[in-house]
Amino acid sequence: MANPIPQAGRVTFLDGRGELPMLEITTPWSSAEIYLHGAHVTHFQKSGEPPLLFMSQCSRFSPDAPIRGGIPIIFPWFGKPADKPGQHGFARVKVWELKEIHSPADGTVTVRLALPGGAELAAGIAVEYVVTVNSDLTAEFIVTNGSAAAFEFENCLHTYFTVGDIGAVSVAGLKGVDYLNQPTAFSRHTDNDDVIRVASEVDRAYLNTAHAVEIRDASLRRVIRVEKEGSRSTVVWNPWIAKAKAMPDFGDEEYQTMICVESGNVASDAIKLLPGETSRLKVKLSSRPA
Ligand code: BG6
């Protein structure tokens, strides 16, 4: 029997939470939401599955605050270097420009956004974000250096995943990799475990690793796969109890149903783009039954 012809995807532009402009996307396989504030993907869900991306019930939706959950874009720095204002850069609190929506007959939807120019970035630095929605979610973060000087930056797609119960989760793909451990003043360790399990705060920047990572969730009976290109770092984060309580935009119990596996280039993996060069960070998120 011939395969059924997929319907085209649908994109609706509307006011989202906090009246922030948002794109609502449906495809034959999935649904998604993207806010222009931060070019923030707040939702992706395959038909018949729980949401892939975790969103905090306490998230702010306000022009001057980052959204808690989904995929915050961390750029042009990660964390809080002493010489930078604020944490994780400014891309996540800028209103991005919608450049293009592509919705071909095969059902896939692709959205292209651009970071507006401004005082924070040197003239000639162009930043684009291309999100493709079908049965998977693919996000590509593209920086082009059209200036006359080298441009150094960190980037990270700080992805929050939904899990059923953090105690039933293992994260595979980072064995043998060195990481900087944030809770112990960024001390350096080698991960010798087959998988990571979370039973206390985990906040690790794994360096020099291009490997795909899998989140195995025995509770939701789902395996989430994070495949990446143009990324040397993977950050794994769960705030656990005390930090969850300390964050105003995160529920006290929500640490039990989320984990961040973030793909990017941070610390010694930071990118130095020479004039005329382009860097591409591409992440594909997929899931399958466990
Ligand atoms: C993670 C960092 O990537 O982001 C953590 O490793 C940090 O240290 C977390 O707490 C959340 O940061 P923010 O700025 O969104 O609260």
Image (cartoon, rainbow, N blue to C red):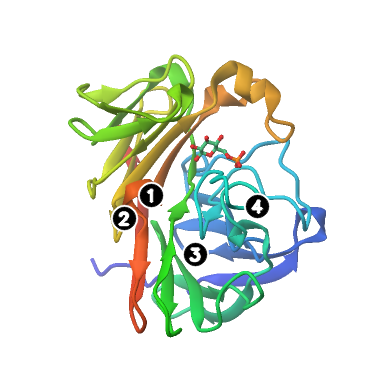
For the residue carrying disc 1, how many other residues have a C-alpha within 10 Å: few (<14), some (14-19), or many (20+)? Answer: many
| Ligand 1 lies under 8 Å from the Cβ of mark 2 | no
Look at mark 1 in the image and give the residue it sits on.
263
For the residue carrying disc 3, how many other residues have a C-alpha within 10 Å: few (<14), some (14-19), or many (20+)? Answer: many
Look at mark 2 in the image and give the residue it sits on.
231
Q: Is residue 40 left or right of residue 37?
A: left
Q: In this view, does 143 lie to the left or right of 80?
A: left
> Could you give the CA–CA distance between mark 1 and mark 3, rounded to whole angstroms?
25 Å
Residue nearest the viewer, comparing 82 with 234 = 82
Kindly identify the amino acid type of the residue bearing the numbered disc 4: Pro
Relative vertical location of residue 64 with respect to residue 289 in this rendering, above or below = below
> Could you give the CA–CA distance between mark 3 and mark 2, rounded to whole angstroms?
28 Å
On residue 85, the disc is 4
> Could you give the CA–CA distance between mark 4 and mark 2, rounded to whole angstroms?
24 Å
Q: How many numbered circles are shown? A: 4
Look at mark 3 in the image and give the residue it sits on.
27
Whether residue 184 is visible? yes
| Ligand 1 lies under 8 Å from the Cβ of mark 4 | no
- Quadrant in the picture for the N terminus: bottom left
Residue nearest the viewer, comparing 47 with 245 = 245
Give residue 46's position: percent from left, percent from top.
Answer: 46, 50
Kindly identify the amino acid type of the residue bearing the numbered disc 2: Ser
Image quarter of residue 58: top right
Relative vertical location of residue 282 with respect to residue 82 in this rendering, above or below = below
Q: Residue furthest front?
A: 83
Give residue 139's position: percent from left, percent from top.
Answer: 43, 62
CB within 8 Å, label 1 to label 2: yes
> Could you give the CA–CA distance between mark 1 and mark 2, rounded to whole angstroms?
6 Å
Q: Which of marks 3 and 2 is nearer the N terminus?
A: 3
Tell me what residue is drawn at x 45 percent, y 53 percent: 156
Question: Secondary structure under badge 2?
Answer: loop
Instruction: Please tell me whether mark 3 or mark 4 is closer to you in this view.
Output: 4
